[in-house]
Image: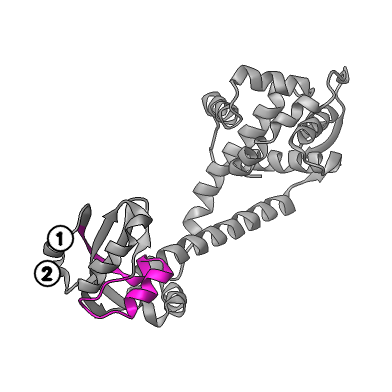
Amino acid sequence: MTFADFRRAAAVLFIALTVAAGAVLPAQAATVVTVNGEPISDVQVDQRLRLFRMEGNNTGRNGALEQLITEAIQLQEAKRLGISVSNAQVDSALLQIARNLNVSRDRLQQMLQQGGVSGDTLQARLRAAIAWNAVTEQAVMPQVQISELELDQQAAQKVADYQNFDYILQEVTFIGGGGRSGQANNFRSNFAGCGTAVELSLTFNDVAVVDIGRRHATQMPEAIARELAGLNVGGITKPRATEAGLAMLAVCEKVQAQDLTFVKGGLREEAGSGAYEREVKAYLDRLRANAKIIR
């Protein structure tokens, strides 16, 4: 479980108020499993199970034990790589969880206590999550490579004919909204090009003409890109409602030009995230396969 995953899970900690509390922990802890010689006790499993119940996690005792085994492996790998987690980092993570829940840190501790969960249990999970994030950034991130050629090919397949244009645009806005649709359409019918747009606007009330510069079709919403593709230089789009009022886009220049930059940016983020997640999982799977786990 990553730190980000835990933060999302922690958003349901309010369930703690409905959890029965007050169970007495065993006086002596018995080892239930060792991970590369490191013991995990029945008290740790019991505590983690209580935390699971507070979060609405229904994987039960086996799920709690497996998470503890994974965290032991993650912390051991962090130690091998010379990575340590400070108390200040853990405290900061606890504070962030409290903020996400809109409660104070003291109130968060009270919620945990009501669920029969010690503060050390939550801190231990956070410490492992922070350490594992550092491990993956150091050991996995540099190994994730994305093929620019594949991105170019994928982007080209996603770009439609109406998106292969580059524009220089003006935006004409009738401030005041729908009640001015008649004036906006009157402006549109008399529009004779960007060069006279300001002069034409002076014959109307509360009209703004703004040069918005160069835009490629892939940077625009699909409906607008389609409409602009059907216009010639000197054309203007139909009025559309915006926060400022009724707006139209005028085409000052238009050239055919394929630009995959904007599309590739989204594809790169998706591909990078997917590749990173797969590499992290494979890394952890290898560590677990090589670990000496005695139950």
Badge 1 marks a residue whose secondary structure is loop
**Mark 2, residue position:** 195
- Amino acid at circle 2: Gly
- The spot of residue 262 in percent (x, y) is 37, 66
User: Which quarter of the picture shows residue 99?
Assistant: top right
Q: What residue is at 37 percent from the left and 57 percent from the top?
A: 178
The residue at 33%/62% (across/down) is 181
* Residue 36 appearing in the image: no
User: Where 227 sits versus 182, above or below?
Assistant: below
* Nearer the observer, 54 or 61: 54
Mark 1 crowd level (few <14, some 14–19, many ≥20, 10 Å Cα)? few
Q: Nearer the viewer, residue 206 or 247?
A: 206
Q: Earlier in the sequence, mark 1 or mark 2?
A: 2
- Percent position (x, y) of residue 133? 56, 43
Tell me if residue 225 is in the magenta stretch.
yes
- For disc 1, the marked residue is 203
Looking at the rendering, the stretch of residues picked out in magenta corresponds to: 209-237
Q: Position of residue 77 (x, y in %)?
A: 62, 43
Nearest the camera: 53 or 193?
193
Judged from the image, the secondary structure of the residue bearing numbered disc 2 is helix
- Asked if residue 287 lies in the magenta stretch, the reply is no
